Amino acid sequence: MAKVGVIGAGAWGIALAVLLRNNGNNVTVMSFVKKEVDMLKSSRENEVTLPGVKLQEDIYVTDKLGEAVEGMDIIVMSVASRFTRETASKLKNIIGDGQVILNVSKGIEEETLMTLTEVINDELPGANVAVLSGPSHAEEVGRGLPTTVVAGARTKETAQLIQNAFMNKSFRVYISPDVLGIELGGSLKNVIALAAGMADGLGFGDNTKAALITRGITEISRLALKMGARLETMAGLSGIGDLIVTCASMHSRNRRAGILIGQGKSPDEAMKEVNAVVEGVYSAKAALKLAGKYQVSMPIIEQVNKVLFENKNVKDAVADLMERDKTSEVSF
């Protein structure tokens, strides 16, 4: 049994807290939002983001960061990507040297182009930072539906610690040393999912969805390999697996936001209606900057950026993708 602190009480944090407690771990959940803490203490569920999934009575809920960190075997970082650095910074005086921090959020910091584990390492160089990712919507994990993910860490021992804490008969955990590849797959797929949603909003069909998924993983893989990630990761759970579920599921906030944009709403209107963090919007600019930095062709991500930030019409973006110069899928 491990002692686990979960920082962040949104849908994913709550789903993982319930999973961890079901596995026999000692779990503390921490939120910076007092209203959220009060709700969790009174009703034992996040009625806004994950209604119907109850925290077990012996999960301790707090608004004090130290109570979720000190003495913990694993600290689960489950905050929106844009708050990762700020949260990590608050841990500086309470984190232990070598303490395991498991990032379960997905994104790239726009200003630095760092992945989230790199951001955490930048703020907490003494921490042992790992990542958990894969096709895993909180709505399904919270209900105990069969799910498979991958844990990435610098050492096999750390990866196995995470594997042992999280894995059960409905939540299978593989391990990998390719932390960078896992994070790139998890963050960049959100941008492609926005495009898939836009296509749905325009009324396009299965052919279009399949094309976006296939060419999307090609774009992600090009960049990931150039940055030093492994091809197996792109073909695995945090690559094509996470991309498929995020492009196809209505649990996906990125797909839902894309649908609204495809139907004619502005990105701001779409995010407001989804009423949740749409990580693809925050990762899109960073993805395009990385494409430029590493001189990688990423036409889908380029067009998503133009729709999001340059007021480009979605139909015009599709036309520009379809009418690009002739090319090969595999070189002769």
Image (tube, rainbow, N blue to C red):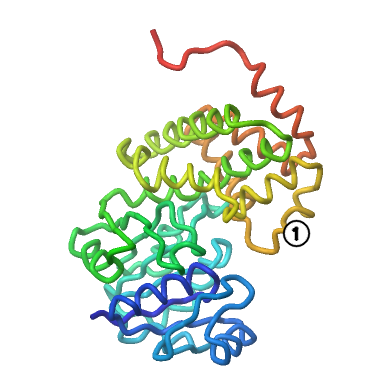
In this picture, is 100 found above or below 330? below
Pick the residue in front: 34 or 101: 34
**Few, some or many C-alpha atoms within 10 Å of disc 1 (few <14, some 14-19, many ≥20)?**
few
- Disc 1 residue type? Glu
Image quadrant in which you'd find residue 32: bottom right
- Identify the residue at horizontal 47%, vertical 34% (top origin): 294
Q: Single out the residue that lies furthest toward the left.
A: 157
**For residue 194, above or below residue 131:** above
Front in this rendered view, residue 209 or 117: 209
Quarter where residue 326 is shown: top right
**In the picture provided, is 174 more to the left or to the right than 206?**
left
The front one of 292 and 135 is 135
Locate the C terminus by quadrant.
top left
Q: Position of residue 197 (x, y in %)?
A: 65, 42
Residue 41 horizontal/vertical position (percent)? 54, 91
Question: Which secondary structure lies at badge 1?
Answer: helix
**Rendering coords of residue 289 (x, y %):** 57, 40
Instruction: Please name the residue that numbered disc 1 is placed on.
Output: 273
How many marks overall? 1
Q: Is residue 329 above or below residue 202?
A: above
Residue 78 left/right relative to 313: left
